[in-house]
Image (cartoon, rainbow, N blue to C red):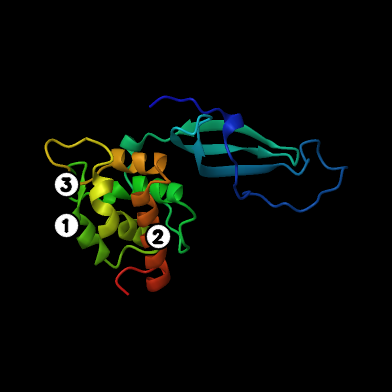
Amino acid sequence: MTDRATSSDLPVNANSNSDTSSESASDSTNDSHEQDLQATVPAIDRDENRIYFMNLSGQNSGDGVFLTKVTIEDKDDLTGKDREVRNEPLSSPVELAYRALHLLPVLDIDKDGIVSRTEFEGAAKDPQYKGTDVQVIAGLSDPSAWERLINFSNDERGKETGISSEDVWTIAERRNDVAVQAAYAAAIANFQISDGTAGH
């Protein structure tokens, strides 16, 4: 994966981890309403060709964000164990792809790198999956999108049979594709129907 994104290209939308209350000017010189930031955000490179998932940390002084650390998550190193699950609708196809990258290693029961239709069907019936996990499962396994999504990348020997991390990466790149839009619509619809909980 090439790194063409710079910190100045990145959208930063994070909650601070510290109190934002006002402090008097007589306090120490470090008290300038600085807030520690921790965030993971999807970011598009300057040519809008590739989605990067950035872990950001830094400080917000009120005049701007000063990044102290920026790392790019390698999709091949994700395990899904520490993924964040929210009980709210996905905000965009990019978020669908982002959360799918983190969830696929958990759904891949046989650890062959491909999440099959059978593995998706099993996950859809499993009550352990909630919120954003449920939406990812519903979106990626949607019948109107499935055949096109599994063929987004040619990363299987012979016929494409399931969704891989490379397919999901391509989903993020082709966020305006008809199949991606169908998958996103299915994800949102599932959240509204199930109230964010699988199997209900």
Q: Earlier in the sequence, mark 1 or mark 2?
A: 1
Q: Earlier in the sequence, mark 3 or mark 2?
A: 3
- The spot of residue 49 in percent (x, y) is 45, 32
Left or right for 30, reference 99: right
Tell me whether the residue at label 3 lies in contact with that at label 2, contact meaning CB atoms closer than 8 angstroms.
no
Relative to 166, residue 188 above or below:
below
Q: Extreme front residue here?
A: 178
Viewer-nearest residue: 60 or 29: 60
Badge 3 amino acid: Thr
Viewer-nearest residue: 159 or 137: 159
Q: Which part of the image, by quadrant, shows the N terminus?
A: top left
Write the residue at 81% across / 35% down: 29
The residue under label 2 is 185
Write the residue at 69% across / 52% down: 19
Residue 34 appears in the figure? yes
Q: Which part of the image, by quadrant, shows the C terminus?
A: bottom left
Relative to 159, residue 122 above or below:
below
* Residues at marks 1 and 2, CA–CA distance in whole angstroms: 22 Å
Left or right for 155, reference 192: left
- The spot of residue 129 in percent (x, y) is 32, 62
Write the residue at 75% across / 38% down: 63
The residue under label 1 is 118
The residue under label 3 is 161
